[in-house]
């Protein structure tokens, strides 16, 4: 009887934990300031209209090495895990070696965000694309940003295969 009870109890515990957590999401709208590159001129109004209204889809950089597009910023609130924000980028590697994309010097509303709250490091193979996510998570003892005015950061792109290659691209979004 005990052999049957323990798996059943664990299953019920798992179900109760999954039922308790409720997550809400809110996409943050903002304007990306043009720092280095402009969007391609061949994009038509029909192409722009077909994009998801809540997605930003702003090209941050498009050069011989990489193309990086800021896709969206999503604010999440979970009853168990707390608040978080995901900044989603699409990264296309045009190089012949793998690259790594990281977030540096992240600030929100004029205040630096403690690096303990940040997670972002994405490897992209040669000739491939990947989704890179900067995740800012709420942790006890650290100030969680409100995202009322702006988000600023530097996209640091480098290659472990070629230590002479690195790029830094500023990103600024105004809400």
Image (tube, helix red, strand yellow):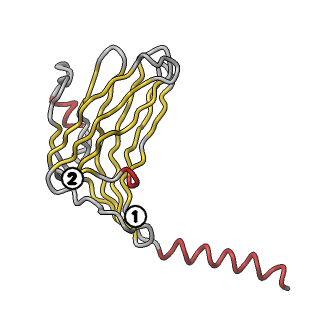
Disc 2, SS: strand
Label 1 environment density (alpha carbons within 10 Å; few <14, some 14–19, many ≥20):
some
- The label on residue 20 is none
Distance in Å between CA atoms under marks 2 and 1: 17 Å
- The label on residue 139 is 1
Which quarter of the figure has residue 72? top left
Question: Which of the marked residues, 2 or 1, is nearer the chain's N terminus?
Answer: 2
Which quarter of the figure has residue 4? bottom right
Percent position (x, y) of residue 164?
42, 16
Percent position (x, y) of residue 96?
48, 14
Residue at 35% x, 31% y: name it. 156
Q: Nearer the viewer, residue 116 or 170?
A: 116
Percent position (x, y) of residue 50?
24, 37
User: What residue sits right under mark 2 in the picture?
Assistant: 111
Is the residue 15 above or below the residue 133 in the image? below
Q: Nearer the viewer, residue 105 or 132?
A: 105
Which quarter of the figure has residue 13? bottom right
Disc 1, SS: loop
Side of 87 where 32 appears, left or right = left
Is the residue 67 above or below the residue 31 in the image? above
Label 2 environment density (alpha carbons within 10 Å; few <14, some 14–19, many ≥20):
few
Q: In which quarter of the image is the N terminus?
A: bottom right
Residue at 17% x, 38% y: name it. 32
Is the residue 160 above or below the residue 142 in the image? above
Percent position (x, y) of residue 160?
51, 24
Side of 16 where 36 appears, left or right = left
| Number of numbered labels in the structure image | 2
């Amino acid at each position: 009887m005990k052999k049957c009870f323990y798996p059943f109890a664990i299953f019920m515990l798992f179900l109760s934990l999954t039922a308790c957590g409720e997550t809400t999401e809110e996409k943050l709208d903002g304007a990306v300031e043009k720092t280095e590159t402009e969007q391609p001129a061949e994009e038509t109004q029909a192409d722009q209209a077909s994009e998801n209204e809540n997605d930003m889809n702003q090209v941050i950089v498009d050069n011989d090495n990489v193309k990086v597009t800021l896709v969206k910023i999503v604010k999440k609130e979970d009853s168990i895990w707390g608040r978080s924000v995901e900044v989603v980028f699409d990264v296309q590697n045009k190089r012949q070696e793998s690259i790594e994309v990281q977030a540096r010097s992240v600030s929100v509303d004029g205040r630096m965000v403690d690096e303990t709250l940040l997670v972002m490091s994405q490897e992209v193979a040669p000739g491939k694309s990947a989704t890179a996510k900067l995740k800012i998570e709420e942790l006890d003892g650290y100030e969680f940003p409100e995202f009322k005015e702006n988000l600023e950061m530097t996209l640091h792109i480098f290659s472990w295969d070629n230590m002479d290659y690195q790029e830094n691209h500023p990103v600024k979004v105004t809400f």
